Image (tube, rainbow, N blue to C red):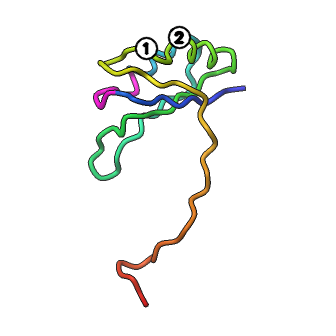
Amino acid sequence: MSKKLYVGNLSFETNNTDLEQWFSAHGSVQSVQVIADRMTGRSKGFAFVEMSSDAEANQAIQALNGQDKGGRQLTVNEAKPREPRTGSRPRSGYNSR
Protein backbone atom coordinates (compact mmCIF):
# COMPACT_ATOMS: atom_id res chain seq x y z
CA MET A 1 0.00 0.00 0.00
CA SER A 2 1.36 3.41 -0.93
CA LYS A 3 1.96 6.22 1.52
CA LYS A 4 1.82 9.95 0.82
CA LEU A 5 4.47 12.20 2.33
CA TYR A 6 4.49 15.94 2.95
CA VAL A 7 7.73 17.71 2.01
CA GLY A 8 8.07 21.25 3.33
CA ASN A 9 10.56 24.12 3.43
CA LEU A 10 11.57 23.57 -0.19
CA SER A 11 13.52 26.20 -2.08
CA PHE A 12 11.32 27.86 -4.69
CA GLU A 13 13.55 26.45 -7.46
CA THR A 14 12.87 22.82 -6.49
CA ASN A 15 10.90 20.94 -9.14
CA ASN A 16 9.26 17.50 -9.51
CA THR A 17 12.41 16.00 -11.07
CA ASP A 18 14.55 17.05 -8.09
CA LEU A 19 12.13 15.47 -5.64
CA GLU A 20 11.85 12.27 -7.63
CA GLN A 21 15.64 11.92 -7.62
CA TRP A 22 15.93 12.54 -3.87
CA PHE A 23 13.17 10.11 -2.94
CA SER A 24 13.88 7.36 -5.49
CA ALA A 25 17.14 6.65 -3.64
CA HIS A 26 14.93 5.33 -0.82
CA GLY A 27 12.33 3.36 -2.77
CA SER A 28 9.85 3.43 -5.61
CA VAL A 29 8.19 6.82 -6.14
CA GLN A 30 4.57 6.64 -7.34
CA SER A 31 3.94 10.36 -7.78
CA VAL A 32 5.44 13.78 -7.08
CA GLN A 33 3.59 17.09 -6.94
CA VAL A 34 5.20 20.44 -6.13
CA ILE A 35 2.38 22.76 -5.09
CA ALA A 36 2.35 26.02 -7.06
CA ASP A 37 0.46 29.28 -6.73
CA ARG A 38 -2.44 29.38 -9.21
CA MET A 39 -1.88 32.99 -10.20
CA THR A 40 1.90 33.12 -10.54
CA GLY A 41 2.80 29.47 -11.11
CA ARG A 42 5.59 29.87 -8.54
CA SER A 43 6.21 27.08 -6.04
CA LYS A 44 4.64 27.56 -2.62
CA GLY A 45 7.62 25.79 -1.02
CA PHE A 46 6.00 22.44 -0.32
CA ALA A 47 5.13 19.23 -2.14
CA PHE A 48 3.66 15.77 -1.82
CA VAL A 49 5.48 12.56 -2.70
CA GLU A 50 3.79 9.17 -2.82
CA MET A 51 5.98 6.16 -2.08
CA SER A 52 5.10 2.54 -2.96
CA SER A 53 5.12 1.17 0.58
CA ASP A 54 5.08 2.20 4.21
CA ALA A 55 8.60 0.83 4.69
CA GLU A 56 9.99 2.90 1.80
CA ALA A 57 8.14 5.99 3.04
CA ASN A 58 9.56 5.55 6.54
CA GLN A 59 13.06 5.08 5.12
CA ALA A 60 12.70 8.29 3.09
CA ILE A 61 11.47 10.20 6.16
CA GLN A 62 14.44 8.99 8.22
CA ALA A 63 16.93 9.82 5.48
CA LEU A 64 15.61 13.17 4.22
CA ASN A 65 13.91 14.92 7.16
CA GLY A 66 16.25 17.70 8.28
CA GLN A 67 18.57 17.36 5.26
CA ASP A 68 19.87 20.53 3.61
CA LYS A 69 18.64 20.82 0.02
CA GLY A 70 19.07 24.08 -1.87
CA GLY A 71 20.12 25.90 1.28
CA ARG A 72 17.01 24.92 3.23
CA GLN A 73 16.41 22.22 5.81
CA LEU A 74 13.69 19.85 4.55
CA THR A 75 10.67 18.84 6.60
CA VAL A 76 9.50 15.36 5.58
CA ASN A 77 6.67 13.54 7.33
CA GLU A 78 3.52 11.56 6.67
CA ALA A 79 0.89 13.69 4.93
CA LYS A 80 -2.28 14.31 6.88
CA PRO A 81 -5.63 13.75 5.19
CA ARG A 82 -7.03 16.87 3.57
CA GLU A 83 -9.66 18.51 5.77
CA PRO A 84 -12.87 19.70 4.16
CA ARG A 85 -13.02 23.44 3.73
CA THR A 86 -15.60 25.24 5.82
CA GLY A 87 -17.39 28.50 5.28
CA SER A 88 -18.87 29.79 2.13
CA ARG A 89 -18.15 32.60 -0.24
CA PRO A 90 -20.58 34.30 -2.54
CA ARG A 91 -20.53 32.70 -5.97
CA SER A 92 -20.95 35.97 -7.80
CA GLY A 93 -18.36 38.71 -8.10
CA TYR A 94 -20.00 40.89 -5.45
CA ASN A 95 -21.48 40.54 -2.00
CA SER A 96 -25.26 40.57 -2.06
CA ARG A 97 -26.98 41.83 1.04
For image coordinates 67% across by 26% down, the residue present is 2
Where does residue 72 sit, x and y in percent of width and height? 34, 21
Query: Which range is magenta?
Result: 11-17
Check contact, mark 2 vs mark 1: CB within 8 A. Answer: yes
Q: Amino acid at mark 2?
A: Ala
- Quadrant for the N terminus in the image: top right
Residue 36, which numbered label? none
Q: Amino acid at mark 1?
A: Gln
Where does residue 16 sit, x and y in percent of width and height? 40, 27
- Relative to 79, 22 lies left or right: left
For image coordinates 36% across by 17% down, the residue present is 69
- Compared to 66, does 1 lie above or below? below
Q: What residue sits right under mark 1 in the picture?
A: 67
Query: Magenta includes 91?
Result: no
Q: Residues within 10 Å of mark 2 (few under 14, many from 20)?
A: some
Q: What residue sits right under mark 2 in the picture?
A: 63
Residue 5, quarter of the rendered image: top right
